[in-house]
Amino acid sequence: MNARAAAHDELGRRVSEIVLGVTTDPLGADGAVDLDGVLAELDSVTTVDLLVRLETEFGIAIPASAVVRENFASLSALRDLVRSEIEHRPSEAG
């Protein structure tokens, strides 16, 4: 596995853990963890909690304009949003 793929997997794992942390019932109808289903059913309060946790964990600021259904439609979409914000965050060097 190359370094980029490893980073992709690690980011996905960390985002998954955060999503699991905001839900009380991550199991789908078949008894398996269904994070895409969890994301689809988030209420507004839980969505804000998720956003705060993601911002804190990754040192990012997710703009209000990015809080759209498409970015929460699946775990991969949410991971891509977080990755984009990580790549575009201001440098701390100065």
Image (cartoon, grey):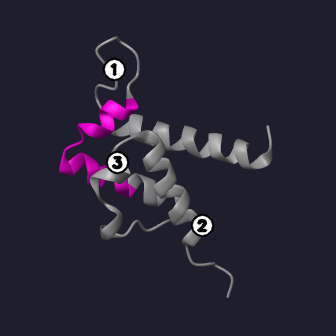
In this view, which residue lies farthest toward the front? 70
Disc with the residue nearer the chain's start (2 vs 1): 1
Would you name the residue on which mark 1 appears? Answer: 27
Report whether residue 13 is seen.
yes
Q: Quadrant of the C terminus?
A: bottom right
Alpha carbon of mark 3 to alpha carbon of mark 2: how far? 19 Å
Residue at (49%, 44%) from the top-left corner? 15
Which of the two residues, 53 or 2, is positioned nearer the viewer here? 2
Would you name the residue on which mark 3 appears? Answer: 72
Residue at (35%, 12%) from the top-left corner? 31
Residue at (28%, 29%) from the top-left corner? 24
Report whether residue 59 is seen.
no
Disc with the residue nearer the chain's start (3 vs 2): 3
The residue type indicated by label 3 comes to Phe
In this view, which residue lies farthest toward the bottom? 94
Disc 3 packing (10 Å; few <14; some 14–19; many ≥20): many
Alpha carbon of mark 2 to alpha carbon of mark 1: how far? 32 Å
Instruction: Place residue 90 in its image quadrant.
Output: bottom right
Q: Quadrant of the N terminus?
A: top right
Alpha carbon of mark 1 to alpha carbon of mark 3: how far? 18 Å
The residue type indicated by label 1 comes to Leu
Instruction: Place residue 86 in its image quadrant.
Output: bottom right
